Amino acid sequence: MSGHGLCLSLALLSLTSGAASEYSTKTDLDYEFGDYRGKWCMDDYGFVYNIGETYYPSPTSCPCTCTEDGPLCIQPQCPRIHPRCTRISYKSCCPVCEAVSKVCVHGGKTYKVLEEFMLSPCEKCRCEANREVYCTVSECPALHCVNPTYEPHHCCPICKSGPNCFAGSQVIPAGVRVDVDEYTVCFCSYKDGTWETHHQATCERRKRPDQPEEPGGTSEQMVEEQLTPELDTIP
C-alpha cells in the first residue's frame, strides 16, 4: 500500500471513531421520551396531536383538547339512560343503553304491553307499547242528593235513597211535596235545564187561621221561601 493510501485509511478510521463516540453519549430515552409539553399531545396508541386539536385519548375516553399544559378533557352532558335499560355499554365517553325491558314496571310490579290494571277504584292504568304506564282518574257524575254514601270497591259516591234535598235540617225526597210542619210544605227544585236538584228545598208557608189578612190577600195565599239547614246536619 502506498503512503498516500495509508494516510487516507487512517483519516477515515479517525472520523468513524469520532462519530461513534459522539452518538454513544446520548441514550435512547433522550430521543423517544423527550419533554413534549407545550408542543403536542399523544393518545394511548401513540398518535400525536398538535396544540388546539381535539382527540380521544382512548376508545372509552371523552374528547380532549391538546393545550400547552397538556390534554384538557371535559365530561359532556350525556343523554339520560332509559329507566328500564337492562344492558348498558361503556364503550364510549357516554354510557349507551343496548337493551330495554319489554314490559312495564310500575309500583314494583310487572305488566305486559297493552295490559290494563287498576291502581285504585278511581285509577285505571295501561302498559303502552312504548313501555310507559299511563293512568286516568275517573270523573264522577254530578250527584242528585245531599247525603251520598261511599260503597267499598266503588270510585264514586252514590245516592242510595235517590234524589233529595234539604228542607231546613230535614232531608226530603225529590219529586213530591212534603209537609215539614202544619203550615209549611216543601219540594226539591231542579237547576235550570238539568235533572240536578238544588241542595235547598223551595218551601211555602200556609197562612195561619189566626193571622190577619193582608190587603189584597186571601186565605189560600202561599209564601215561598228557602229554608237553610243547620251546619251540623249536613253529612
Image (cartoon, grey):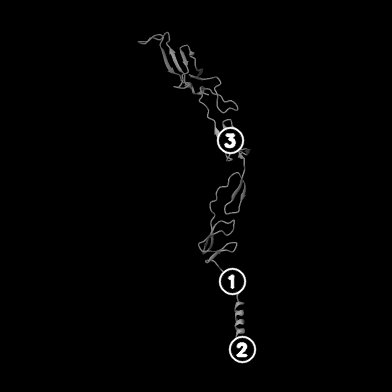
The residue sitting at 44% across, 13% down in the picture is 205
Pointer 3 and pointer 1: residues touching (CB < 8 Å)? no
Q: Position of residue 182 (x, y in %)?
A: 47, 11
The residue sitting at 59% across, 71% down in the picture is 31
Residue 124 showing in the rendered view: yes
Q: Mark 3 or mark 1: which comes first in sequence?
A: 1
Give whichever of 73, 12 is nearer the camera: 12
Of discs 2 and 1, which sits in the foreground? 2
Residue 5: assigned label? 2
Q: Which residue is mark 1?
A: 31
Of discs 3 and 2, which sits in the foreground? 2
Q: Residues within 10 Å of mark 3 (few under 14, many from 20)?
A: many
- At label 1, the amino acid type is Tyr
Q: Residues within 10 Å of mark 1 (few under 14, many from 20)?
A: few
Residue 126: assigned label? 3
Q: Residue furthest front?
A: 1
Q: Position of residue 67 (x, y in %)?
A: 51, 62
Q: What is the quadrant of residue 113 in the picture?
A: top right
Q: State whether residue 186 is above or below residue 140.
A: above
Q: State whether residue 8 is above or below residue 208.
A: below
Q: Mark 3 or mark 2: which comes first in sequence?
A: 2
